[in-house]
Amino acid sequence: MTLEITLEVAMTAKKEILEKMKNGDVFIHPTDTVYGIGCDATNPSSVQRIKDIKKSRHPLSVIAPSMQWIRKNLIVNHDEFLNKFPGPYTLIMKKNDPEAMPWISKNDKIGVRMPDHLITDLIKEFGKPFITTSLNISGKPVIKNLKDLTKNMVDCVDVIINAGILKGRPSTVYDLSGPKIVKIR
């Protein structure tokens, strides 16, 4: 049975939410842009569940738990871009270890976010990267209102954090993995 709670309840019940994150639960969560679907990025089976739900084999992005995590695990070619965090950006960077977390990205790059949203505070407390990818079937419109969720999608996740209707658009994506900065979206 899927647990649906408001953002306010999630923030007051942090201990229980963090426990669900540790257990590998799959979440529908708000961000500063659109609703996302996420889980503990270090849990390969939970990450696979998200890929199956989205019907996607594309690399996924993570919400970083801290700037220290980014600097420790990723190659920061364009340091000034870290000033965009927190904010509605996804920065694609090379991994320090190209073979790290292959269940997220089989190549040597990974997308990283730090939304300007309370969800980032939960991830900071969690202390590990958390998958975040737009809540939609691959190729379909993103979801800004949870009333647009299909019953099948609700049944596929463990926790839904409802923050009402979101008014954002998908994050702006920059590829910072090479010497030149490339705006993807």
Image: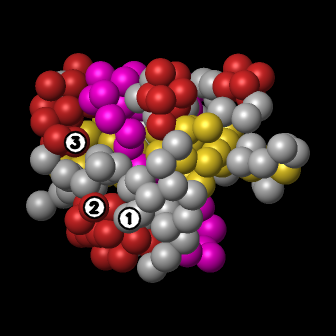
In the image shown, does 124 or 101 lie closer to the viewer?
Answer: 101
Q: Amino acid at mark 2?
A: Pro
How far apart are the two marked residues, 3 and 1, measured between alpha carbons? 18 Å
| Number of marks | 3
Q: Which residue is mark 1?
A: 103
Q: Which residue occupies the foreground of this view, 59 or 50?
A: 59
The dot on residue 21 is 3
Residue 182, magenta (yes or no): no
Q: Which comes before the other along the chain, label 2 or label 3?
A: 3
Q: Please provide percent x and percent y for residue 53.
A: 37, 73
Residue beneath disc 2: 44
Q: Is residue 44 visible?
A: yes
Q: Is the residue marked by circle 1 packed among few (<14), some (14-19), or many (20+) residues within 10 Å? A: some
Kindly tell me whether residue 160 is visible in this rendering: no
Three-letter residue code for mark 3: Met
Residue at the location (23% across, 20% down)?
12
Query: Is residue 143 in the magenta section?
Result: yes
* Contact? badges 2 and 1 (CB < 8 Å): yes
- Which stretch appears magenta? 115-144
Relative placement, left or right, of 57 versus 4 is: right
